[in-house]
Amino acid sequence: MAEKNGKKEWGRKTLAARGASLFEPHTGAISTPIYQSSTFRHPGLYESTGFDYSRVTNPTRLELERTLALLEHGRFGLAFATGMGAISSIIKLYKPGDHIIVSEDLYGGTYRLFTEYYEKYGFRFSWVDTSDFSAVEAGIRPETKAIFVETPSNPMMKVTDIRRCAELIHQKGGDIIVDNTFLSPYFQNPLDFGADLITHSGTKYLAGHNDTLSGFIVHQRDDLEEPLRNAQKSEGAALSPFDAWLTLRGIKTLALRMRQCEDNALRIAQWLRRHQRVDQVFFTGFEDHPQYELSCSQSRGFGGMISFYVKSPQDVPVLLKNVSLILFAESLGGVESLITYPLVQTHSAIPESMRLSAGVNDRLLRLSVGIEDGDDLIADLDAAFRQCA
């Protein structure tokens, strides 16, 4: 147990395994109960147990929110039904006319949310390679209020300098928002480097079992807590008690899963790099990755995500058809390894010119490496490649 600011704090492995409360204090239950109740009894007029209506707060969800806040070194955590619900609530901190710089290669659903919905309400977005700090500087306008980054980015595994971007936007009185889905709080804590808001698709590594949806915001600013809570309860995108419990259960093994995923990913990335039908592999754990040193300076690991170009687009359908242990499916971060074709599945909402500029072409595949035996995963890829003409 470490000491920080005079307060004893558990390490991240212990926090993940045990949660904020360690056990349920009223009954001693080791597993936080599922409080499957929509409403709660008031002891009397103007009296409350602290829980009134589950859209506003619920004991199961509260334990999850507190746990994730601790893991992310934040003070406040908010749990949503999906990651997109969390991002939508963040954007409501701003007003029409405000400008936000966004990582150019990021999840296509985020692009769709910003361009098809918030732009028509007067918000303005610029899509920038945020791994290039000079491009971020050049993108700043007088009306810029935030920088929204994925780091590593989805799917090109570019790394953004959180600290420098934070210093830049703070000079303008704005915020930096970091999507930390790919690395999770086990490997990266953006608040430590100046981030104002962290968002997660908890569906991915946090829950970790491809069996539930969830999303999160974590922060440590008093001025942001009330407007974010108000957005959460007013729009009704709060996480259900059962899904909160599933995510809590998943987080218990976060440390073990992240390490196994990373170990497998490094082996597979090295194997892919040597394969005669592979043109280029994108993995932040390679020492020759353009932002390798930056990754080492702001994270404790590289995660389980790999993207790669095959030499011929004709190989794509063959590989997707012939993998068997690795599953051809959307999403990422679960115990099962998944392979995805970003051009069609995750980034189809992004215009072709922008996709190509970011590197998302017809030869790109994305691999979310799970916790299976690494030899089995390599054998599965090898067998699929052998079917290519």
Image (cartoon, rainbow, N blue to C red):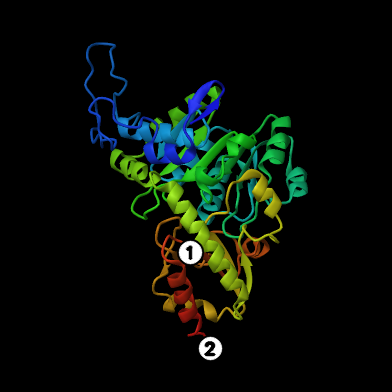
User: Which quarter of the figure has residue 306?
Assistant: bottom right
Residue at 64% of width from left, 44% of height from top? 298
Secondary element type, mark 2? loop
Question: Few, some or many C-alpha atoms within 10 Å of disc 2 (few <14, some 14-19, many ≥20)?
Answer: few
Secondary element type, mark 1? loop
Number of marks drawn: 2
Task: Tell me the mark number nearer the camera, choosing from 2 and 1.
Answer: 2
Q: Examine the rendered structure and indicate whether residue 305 appears above or below residue 385.
A: above
Disc 1 marks a residue whose amino acid type is Gln
Q: In the rendered structure, find residue 116 and report the number of the disc placed on it.
A: none
Q: In the rendered structure, find residue 389 and report the number of the disc placed on it.
A: 2
Residue hosting label 1 = 345
Residue 74 in picture, x, y percent from top left = 52, 31
Q: Which one is earlier in the sequence, the residue at label 2 or at label 1?
A: 1
Residue at 55% of width from left, 47% of height from top? 114
Residue 175 in picture, x, y percent from top left = 63, 34
Would residue 55 be visible to someone looking at this image? yes
Residue furthest out toward the front: 1
Q: Examine the rendered structure and indicate whether residue 7 appears above or below residue 328.
A: above
Residue at 41% of width from left, 37% of height from top? 79
Disc 2 marks a residue whose amino acid type is Ala
Q: CA distance from mark 2 to mark 1?
A: 24 Å
Residue 313 in picture, x, y percent from top left = 57, 78
Q: In screen coordinates, is 175 left or right of 85?
A: right
Residue 343 in picture, x, y percent from top left = 54, 66
Would residue 91 be visible to someone looking at this image? no
